[in-house]
Amino acid sequence: MTIRVCLAGATGWAGSAVARTIAKSDDIVLISAVSRTHAGKTLGEALNESSLACPIYATAQEALEAQPCDVFFEFTKPDVAKLNVLSALQHGAHVVVGTSGLTDEDYTEIAFSADKSQRGVLAVGNFALTVVLLQKFAEIAARFIPQWEIIDYASDGKKDSPSGTVRELANRLSKVRSSELTVLLEETQGVKETRGARMSGSQVHSLRLPSYTISAEVIFGMPDQRLTLRHDSGTSAQPYVDGSLLAIRKVSSFVGLRRGLDSVLNFET
């Protein structure tokens, strides 16, 4: 059966790469796209890809009302992402979320709506296989090592902080345990903010500098030994494409909210 997809953010850096790959797929078809700057055109005109003939709408609401889709893929910006996801669920679509910056509170609301609509929402902070492995390895390490901190790296132009990759990592580690602090934050002498932010039971530090794309590092410490797990992204969107298509194919297989691409993969730890 062909999966009909509406892709929000289809002309962006990652969205355009996903769109071009869908054009070559046998089981997935783009029926609509969302891009405010290219509204009124076809996606093929915007991307110079003749095989993509679907129309572009200015908003997700317009696209969803124009024609029904099986899966809505959210790849826009944090300030509109939650509204787009909730609207897609109301229109009967399953949803894949690739936009970073949504909070745990946002996902609580989305989870409620997904259950009510009897649809699946798969939220993926990063679709790269190396990130999936980083998350799994970190969960294993947290079972045995009670102290860790997370460092979030991104380009100087990235507005949301921390990245969706790190938000997801902190959320997943919180399901194992909260990290222990030898010196409690309230007992810190000097500038407490230099110890980072407490997020979902982890200390998180965000760097925003030129030359970075997206990197995530979690450092586990024990007396006289240390374990460092790190993911680094390159400059292309290719690492995210295969994971995105996998998410599209898997999101209709469950009801409710799942976070992380590995939640629809078979891992044994």
Image (cartoon, helix red, strand yellow):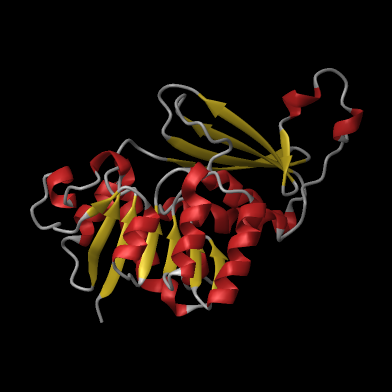
Q: Measured from the top left, where is residue 78 in percent x and y?
A: 50, 44
Image position, residue 213 (x, y; %): 41, 33
| Residue 148 visible in the snapshot | yes
Query: In the rendered view, does 190 fall on the left or right side of 216?
Result: right
Residue, x 12% and y 46% (percent of image)? 45
> Dividing the image into 4 quarters, which one contains the C terminus?
bottom right
**Is residue 194 shown left or right of residue 26?**
right
Compared with residue 94, is residue 173 higher up or lower down, i.e. above or below?
Answer: above
Taking depth in this image into account, of 263 and 79 the one nearest to the observer is 79
Quarter in which the N terminus is drawn = bottom left
Considering depth in this image, is 195 or 157 the residue closer to the camera?
Answer: 157
The x and y percentages for residue 86 are 51, 61
Q: Is 179 situated left or right of 91 in this image?
A: right
Q: Does residue 123 show up?
A: no
Residue 262 in the image, given as x and y percentages of width and height: 50, 64
Q: Residue at x 57, y 48 (%)?
A: 102
